[in-house]
Image: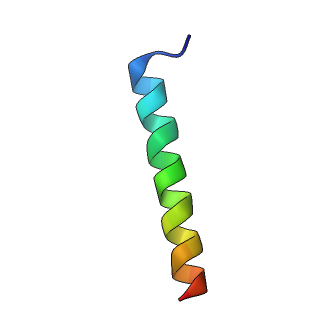
Amino acid sequence: MLSKSLQAKLHNNNQMRKRKRINLLV
């Protein structure tokens, strides 16, 4: 089981990837 800090980092990375994808699409 991942620690909460690791889960938060992964979540932030996913959010940033989605944002980058959106920026590329726009």
| Residue at 47%, 41% in the rendered image | 11
Picture quarter with the N terminus: top right
Residue at image position (53%, 16%) is 2
Instruction: Give the image location of residue 26, x and y in percent.
Output: 53, 89
Q: Residue placed at 59% from the left, 84% from the top?
A: 25
**Viewer-proximal residue among 15 and 5:** 15
Task: Give coordinates of residue 4: x percent, y percent.
Answer: 40, 20
Q: Indicate the position of residue 24 as horizontal and vertical percent values.
A: 59, 82
Residue extending furthest toward the top: 1
User: Image quarter for residue 21?
Assistant: bottom right
Q: Is residue 23 above or below residue 6?
A: below
Q: Is residue 9 left or right of residue 25?
A: left
The residue depicted at 47 percent of the width and 28 percent of the height is: 7
Please state if 1 lies on the left or on the right of 5 as rendered.
right
Q: Nearer the viewer, residue 13 or 25?
A: 25
Above or below: residue 25 compared with residue 22: below
